[in-house]
Image: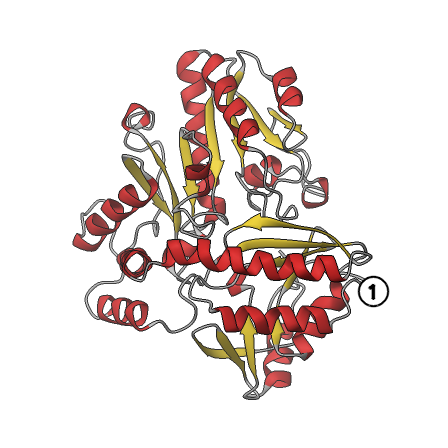
Amino acid sequence: MNNIEIREQTDKYYLPVFGRYPLALTHGKGCMVYDADGEGYLDFLAGIAVNSLGYAHPALVKAISEQAGKIMHCSNVFYTDVQARAVKLISEATGFDRVFLANCGAEANEGAIKLARKYGHSKNDGKYRIITAVHSFHGRTMMTVTATGQPKYQQGYEPLPAGFDYVPYGDLEALKEVMDEDVCCVMLEPIQGEGGVHVPSDEYLQGARALCDKYDALLIFDEIQSGVGRTGQWFAYMHTGIKPDVLTFAKGIGGGFPTGGFCVDEKLAHVFKPGDHGGTFGGNALACAAIEAALTTIKEEGLVEAAAEKGKYFMGKLQELKAKYPEKVTEVRGRGLILGMELCKPGGAVVEHCLKDHVIVNCTAGNVIRLVPPLIVTEKEIDTAVAALEAAQIGRASCRERV
């Protein structure tokens, strides 16, 4: 099947819930991905910060293939050797004692919210309020879309679950105003990804930590997009000097295989009792093999440190674009290999022009070019992407957002 045939058949049968690029991808290698017509593209979207090892990394392919020949799934009423190894690696990478495994970021955040509510009810029945940030994104289940501080994702699903309040991101005074003894948790992204790649001050996150301590509320960090080495630390919270009570993860932790989860320290390990939470497929053997391979490879290949180094190089190149085109680029921001270039106009034309130059980038929040390449990206590949961005005559036309 060629690109057109694949698109037509997919559009005939699949619900029309995605704004898709006009490409049908078939395979990849490294940071390159190829369509059904044999055209190659340099991928600086990486499945939206998912393909941390790029495409077809030998260690990941080997681990998944070998595990598929042993056991792919069994109920969580049994133990598996590969799950035991995976959760130990997650504990070491995150710095937390205990792990729960799910299938995706929304499930991870849903579980974290349930844990916070259960924690609140253990204190008093009125301790149920959840505070999140404006422009946040936490998922598309009913609970996580309610946690998401963007009305456009909530419209048409009312009535939404009760007990959520939203405050401006980065505004500690606004957070202080809504905090009281009824708050069971504050849920924040240490870097907002879909909201436009916003990096708050360390003081803001430290202040949120202090407020949660004052009111005995849990601090949840949603690191679905910012975690697993992307910022130049294993997790973004490690830049801040504080530690959340609950950390959620997904995307890059499976190297492209669908998985996710959350972790807590021992003091919260028994908030859930047997039967309070679970899932059929979370922590399945195939997912755990992917986690084990991804985390081991990231560590052995020094990709956390590489993300810091390459991110600094990438940021420098984007700053040069900003200096060259101040009337078109208003700001460059981010940390490590999660970067955003804010334009003075909607960014869809830039995305489309880059695609014609065989470079895949993404526009989010209307006018922010989001750049989240695989952690294995090279400086030469960064140069190619920057050249495509410059050739796109940054900042024209309308933006078709894709999340």
Q: Crowding at label 1, few (<14), some or many (≥20) Cα neighbours within 10 Å? A: few
Q: Is residue 208 above or below residue 312?
A: above
Q: Position of residue 132 (x, y in %)?
A: 59, 31
**For residue 283, side relative to residue 402 (left or right):** left
Q: Residue 51 sits in which quadrant?
A: bottom left
Find numbered disc 1 in the image and state the secondary structure of the residue it sits on. loop
Looking at the rendered image, the quarter that the N terminus falls into is bottom right
- The residue carrying mark 1 is 397
Classify residue 397 as left or right of residue 361: right
On the question of residue 76 being in view, the answer is no
| 249 left or right, relative to 153 | left
Residue 26, percent from left and from top: 49, 80
Q: How is the image coloured?
A: secondary structure
From the viewer's side, name the closer residue of 49 and 155. Answer: 49
Residue 72 in view of the camera: yes
Q: Residue at x 72, y 44 (%)?
A: 152
Q: Position of residue 308 (x, y in %)?
A: 45, 53
User: Viewer-proximal residue, 344 or 17?
Assistant: 344
- The answer to whether 52 appears left or right of 91 in the picture is right
**Foreground: 294 or 106?**
294
Residue 265: name its quadrant: top left
State the image coordinates of residue 101 (x, y, percent, origin top left): 34, 45
The C terminus appears in which quarter of the rendering? bottom right
Determine whether 98 is above or below 180 in the image. Answer: below
Amino acid type of the residue that numbered disc 1 sits on in the rendered structure: Ala
Image label count: 1
Which residue: 62% across, 23% down?
Answer: 172
Query: Which residue sits at x=82%, y=65%?
Result: 396
User: Residue at (65%, 16%) from the top-left corner?
Assistant: 177
